[in-house]
Image (tube, rainbow, N blue to C red):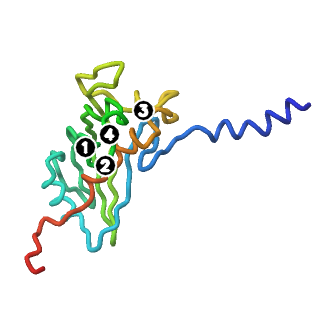
Amino acid sequence: MKKIIFLFFMGPVLVFGQATEYGAFKIVDTEIVYQKIFFQDSITVGKLAEFMKSVPEFANVSVSNDEVTADLRDLTVDYKKFMFSQVATPPIIQTGRFSGKVTAEAKDGKYRMTVKSLQMKGDIGYKKIPQPENMTNYACMNSGTILSREWCRPNMLGLLEQAITDKFTYKSSKKDSDW
């Protein structure tokens, strides 16, 4: 009887101990996805499209209905910019090039960026990845149902999130000469 009670109380702890989200990354339909909401006054889909066309990592930017779609290509992580040392940064973050399919949507005072089909190439430490491969295969376990503990760290998904967020933060293309 004590074993049954013990399992009853420990069961939920084991289930809830597995991460399905880390920062702006989450698992959606067995795929790791980046999704974040940014707050920006007077943002429009047109302004987002103009901004995305000015960022070199975005390609094939197009506007349809009330969203902007683009390809994210060869995003690299500048880990030194985010105050991480080379020793503390995993090889895939140092050498990796990340890509995916981006969707941007705007509402009053905010916009949401979503990256699906995340792929990566680079050196993962135990293997070199010369051609883009699905990041879900490396960052997730159990057929894409939980995030790998090795990836749920500030120097892995945390750094990748900072790099993507840095690229996705809206910056007006107009120079303010009246300062």
What is the three-letter code of the residue carrying label 1? Asp
Can you give x and y, in whole percent of width and height, for residue 64 in the image? 22, 56
- Element under disc 1: loop
C-alpha span from label 1 to label 2: 7 Å
Q: Quadrant of the N terminus?
A: top right
Q: Quadrant of the C terminus?
A: bottom left
- Element under disc 4: loop
Residue at x 42% of width, y 43% of height? 154
- Element under disc 2: loop
Nearest to viewer (mark 3 / mark 1): 1
Mark 2 surroundings: few (<14), some (14-19) or many (≥20) residues within 10 A? few
C-alpha span from label 2 to label 4: 9 Å
Tell me the residue that label 1 is attached to.
78
- Element under disc 3: helix
What is the three-letter code of the residue carrying label 2? Phe
Residue at x 20% of width, y 63% of height? 171
Can you give x and y, in whole percent of width and height, for residue 163 in the image? 29, 47
Nearest to viewer (mark 1 / mark 4): 4
Q: Residue furthest top?
A: 127
Task: Give the mark nearest the N terminus, 3 or 1.
Answer: 1
Task: Give the mark nearest the N terminus, 4 or 3.
Answer: 4
Q: Nearer the viewer, residue 100 or 178?
A: 178
Q: Which mark is on residue 85? A: 4
Q: Which mark is on residue 82? A: 2
Mark 3 surroundings: few (<14), some (14-19) or many (≥20) residues within 10 A? some
Q: Which mark is on residue 43? A: none
Q: Are marks 1 and 2 in contact (CB under 8 Å)?
A: yes
C-alpha span from label 2 to label 3: 21 Å
Nearest to viewer (mark 4 / mark 3): 4
Tell me the residue that label 3 is attached to.
139
C-alpha span from label 3 to label 1: 20 Å
